[in-house]
Image (tube, helix red, strand yellow):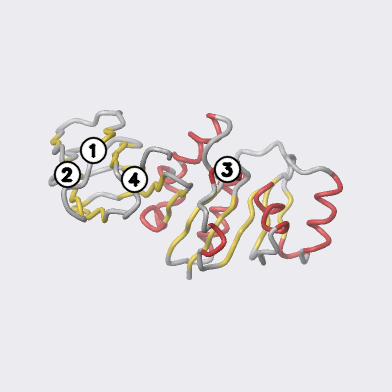
Amino acid sequence: MQINILAGGATSLWPSDLFDFPGLWIGADRGAWRLYQHHIPMLMAVGDFDSLTPDELHMLESHLKTNEIIHVKAEKDETDTELALLYAQAQNPDSINIFGATGGRLDHLLSNLWLLADPTFEKIVEKTKIIDNVNSVSYLKPGLKTVSKIPSAKYLGFMPLNTVANFKIIDAKYPLALTDSVYKMWSSNEFVGNMVHVSFDTGVIMVTQTRDKV
């Protein structure tokens, strides 16, 4: 089972084929309203819905069953996207795609990118991607790992999200070997073939595949 989460980020950053992605949908805050506007069935809508007008919220609540909407207080520890990811994780999915999570406020972007470093999401680290119209973000747990090239992407990047030991980029255009943990975005690397292998002993690494906007 694949679950797609739509957060409330700018629609201009949506992939052009957003609603062609297979799977069940969860709307996070304004993402739920946008799913409603596009007549996309929802497994769940979750958030404080502070980005909706009272009329929009009333229409959304009227459209969904009581058990399909979780309306939380604005004063909370988790972000709306985090709450949606918690619900998605509870469904034991095979994969999770998050859309609408980039652009806009920098604190929202950083919060979303670092979500998978939280031990709460340990079971879905390698099942989760954040996707927009030029970027695909995935995550790796320790071991010898293979990263497969996305056809539309040119650049490859790696970012340790916590203490990552003995990190090696093995067969990319620019190899790397580190003994100590270095908190740095190793960006603008490239594939030589269709796969790149990396290895590390501890922590979580964020992997970015991207291209320049056209």
Which sits in the foreground, 83 or 55?
55
Which residue is found at the position 13% from the left and 36% from the top?
Answer: 177
**Mark 1 crowdedness (10 Å alpha carbons): few <14, some 14-19, many ≥20:** some
Q: Looking at the image, is mark 4 or mark 3 earlier in the sequence?
A: 3
Q: Kindly report the distance in space between the C-alpha atoms of the residues bearing marks 1 and 3.
A: 26 Å
Q: Looking at the image, is mark 1 or mark 4 earlier in the sequence?
A: 1
Q: Looking at the image, is mark 1 or mark 2 earlier in the sequence?
A: 2
Up the image or down, 85 lies above or below 135; here it is below
Name the residue carrying label 4. 209
- Quadrant in which residue 38 is drawn: bottom right
Residue 12, disc: 3
Which residue is found at the position 20% from the left and 45% from the top?
Answer: 201
Residue 104, disc: none
* Amino acid type, mark 4: Gln
Which residue is found at the position 73% from the left and 45% from the top?
Answer: 49
Name the residue carrying label 1. 189
Q: Which element is circle 2 on?
A: loop
**Mark 2 crowdedness (10 Å alpha carbons): few <14, some 14-19, many ≥20:** some
Residue 172, disc: 2
- Quadrant in which residue 128 is drawn: bottom left
The percent coordinates of residue 153 (x first, y second) are 33, 47
Up the image or down, 83 lies above or below 20; here it is above
* Labels 4 & 3 near each other (Cβ < 8 A): no
